[in-house]
Amino acid sequence: MKTETVLVTPLRAAEYLKLNTANVPVRPSKVRYFAGILRRGEWVLVHQGIAISTERVILDGQHRLMAIVLTGIAAQIRVTTDADPKSWVAIDTNIPRPLAAVLGRPSREVETIRFLQNIAQGNGKKTVAECNQAYAVLGTATTKLFEYCPTPARVLTAAPIRAAAVYLIWSGKDADHVLRTYGAMANRRYGDMSTAAQAFVRQVDSNKIRSGSLDRLDFFARAMLALDPETVALTRLHVADTTKFTSIVRIKLQQALGIKAEATDAVSAKPFGQRGYRASSPDATECIQDAKELQKKYHSALTRRRHLKKSMTGRRYEKFFPNWEAFMAAVQASQ
């Protein structure tokens, strides 16, 4: 087994991907994550990278390679060749480090800011640099909230409510009113709540809204109405279109965080609170979809313990990747 540092260009990455015939299914969110790191210039050379078995099959690194191809940006990567094919079962089985531990901040603070980041950027893993930038923008409001009311309460201090309070304080609303109302809701002091806040607590108690529901944007939007000093007189909290309601929040956060409104990644961020993902580039979509189909074919073979047979690994990648030649030509033309 030999490991060396290699400058992996898009063309070389595409050549490596020809060996990607027996791997786990492609995760578009992970491709987006690495693509974002490359575009922002945050790529760091680490001990992890690309692993190729003695049978010329990619064991690790497919998402990094796809990100390099899709962005057209070369990167320094550790490439290991002649790895034992059986080592595949031991790759990526570790427990990932919590983001709060990496940032050195309380987990509830990180969860609150991540919620607002997801509104601005869409679901997906965020880099340490992105989180630090979000803290620079939202950290003061977050600190105020947790200093005023550090005690957690079931449901009524869930991440969507905390995020709503932080956003209102950050956006210039009456911080004293927001903090008083949040504290009253957390401690169920009905006498200190506004009419809107009381209506929100009643909806929580009656299970009309829940922090664990699939559409957490609805929870966030109702919490915004409950905490906003301009909507204190509301007796009924209802949001017909949460996406439209939070569009102003999204735009303001994007401007503050320096995020372009239109996704620039070849595979754009998944909208927060929605399933699936959108792609801004048809070519990139076909590339990912073809790769996913390829992985399905070989993943099925893997479960039947036939992926190491010479007859399987010797097949040409192009046979399962109908757009490969056109894709390679586009990559070469971009060099």
Image (spheres, grey):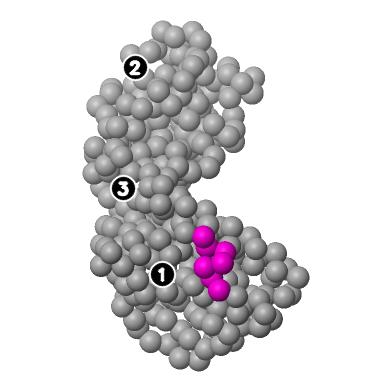
Looking at the rendered structure, the kind of residue marked 3 is Thr
Labels 1 and 2: the sequence-earlier one: 1
Residue appearing at x 63%, y 60% in the figure: 296
Image vertical order of residue 274 relative to residue 282, above or below:
above
**SS under mark 2:** helix
Q: Residue 121: x percent and y percent?
A: 37, 43
User: In the rendered structure, which amino acid carries the disc numbered 2?
Assistant: Pro
The magenta segment is 316-322
Give the SS element for disc 3. Answer: loop
From where the camera sits, is residue 149 visible? Answer: no
Of helix, strand and loop, which one carries label 1? helix
| CA–CA distance in space, label 2 to label 3 | 36 Å
Q: Is residue 57 above or below residue 117?
A: below
- Residue on which disc 3 sits: 264
Per the image, is 318 magenta? Answer: yes
Q: Is residue 224 above or below residue 27?
A: above
**Category of crowding for the residue at label 2, using alpha-carbon neighbours closer than 10 angstroms: few (below 14), some (14–19), many (at least 20):** some
Name the residue located 27 percent from the left edge and 50 percent from the top edge: 133
Say which mark, if any, is on residue 14. 1
